[in-house]
Amino acid sequence: MKEIYKKALEAISSKTDLVPQVGIILGSGLGGLAQRIENAVVIPYAEIPGMKASTAPGHAGQFVLGTIGNKTVICMQGRLHFYEGHTMQEIAFPVRLMKLLGIKTLVVTNACGAVNTSFSIGDLMLIEDHINMMGANPLTGENEADFGPRFCDMTFAYTPRLRELAAQVAEEQGILLQKGVYLGYMGPNYETPAEIRAFRTMGADTVGMSTVPEVLTASHCGLEVLAISLITNMAAGIQKVKLSEQEVIDTAAARAKVLQGLVEGILERI
């Protein structure tokens, strides 16, 4: 194991002896789920060797460890993005760190734009697959053999049994859960209308600026993955309006409790 991981583990173990079962990554405007964690231990990223700062709006930049229902969790309240200038390996670091801490499952959430015109603002979408249009991959360079193989299969990156469970819980809670393909885009600018038309032709249902690097890393680590998007806007060109960061934050705030309830219901049965 690289020395930086040992130092990071020591920093966390000096704060808590909890062994998390599930890791949760919270997207833009979705940090409120961390407030539902009981007996919470909060560790700012700045106190962990190797962790970079989260600078995106609505991202607190801290780990929160504790329990949700019957599960011990570690929550990233604020993720790292490629557009912030972080390398793909730096984005991979916290996923690998959570793996070393003991998680078996990673739950990823994000705020995204709808490419599929049958979707609506405020919908939740279960990610079944992704398209990587970020132009980079956290698995390039020297292989981190302690975590996984040189060539990583992605056929079942989004764990089928967890997708089935999420669909069941959503139905029980009366939540419309769309299903589809998420396309990862580098950002930080929103996509052009021409790009959105191209992405739709490629088979994308939603587009966003995160998630793909984390899922690639998690799959390489052998983690089970569940990923859910909150659609906060229609992608560029679908409606004759400009896209805005505030729209994303406002929609996420309005629908966050629905997503939080869904995630909690899923955690109870993982």
Image: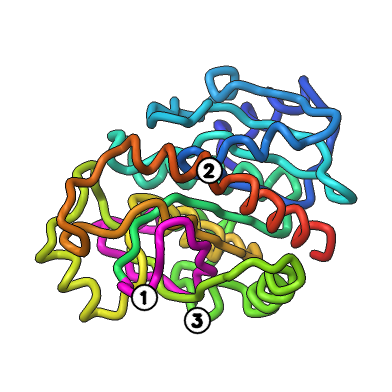
Q: CA distance from mark 3 to mark 2?
A: 34 Å
* Residue where numbered disc 1 is placed: 118
Instruction: State which quarter of the image contains the C terminus.
Output: bottom right
Q: CA distance from mark 2 to mark 1?
A: 21 Å
Q: Is residue 200 left or right of residue 265?
A: left
Q: Nearer the viewer, mark 3 or mark 2?
A: 2
**Residue 142 at what x, y percent from top left?**
39, 54
Residue under the point 26% across and 63% down: 133
* Residue where numbered disc 3 is placed: 155
Amino acid marked by disc 2 = Ala
Q: Is residue 228 above or below residue 22?
A: below
Instruction: State which quarter of the image contains the N terminus.
Output: top right
Q: Quadrant of residue 265?
A: bottom right
> Is label 3 in contact with label 1 (beta carbons under 8 Å)?
no
In this picture, which residue range is highlighted in magenta?
116-140
Residue under the point 79% across and 28% down: 40
Q: Residues within 10 Å of mark 3 (few under 14, many from 20)?
A: few
The majority secondary structure of the magenta stretch comes to loop
Q: Is residue 10 above or below residue 33?
A: above
- Dot 1: what SS? loop
* Residue where numbered disc 2 is placed: 254
**Residue 198 at what x, y percent from top left?**
16, 73
Amino acid marked by disc 1 = Ser
**Residue 249 at what x, y percent from top left?**
42, 38
Q: Residues within 10 Å of mark 2 (few under 14, many from 20)?
A: few
Q: Is residue 162 left or right of residue 249?
A: right
- Dot 3: what SS? loop
Q: CA distance from mark 3 to mark 1?
A: 26 Å
Q: Pick whichever, 220 or 248, lies toward us.
A: 248
Residue under the point 55% across and 25% down: 45
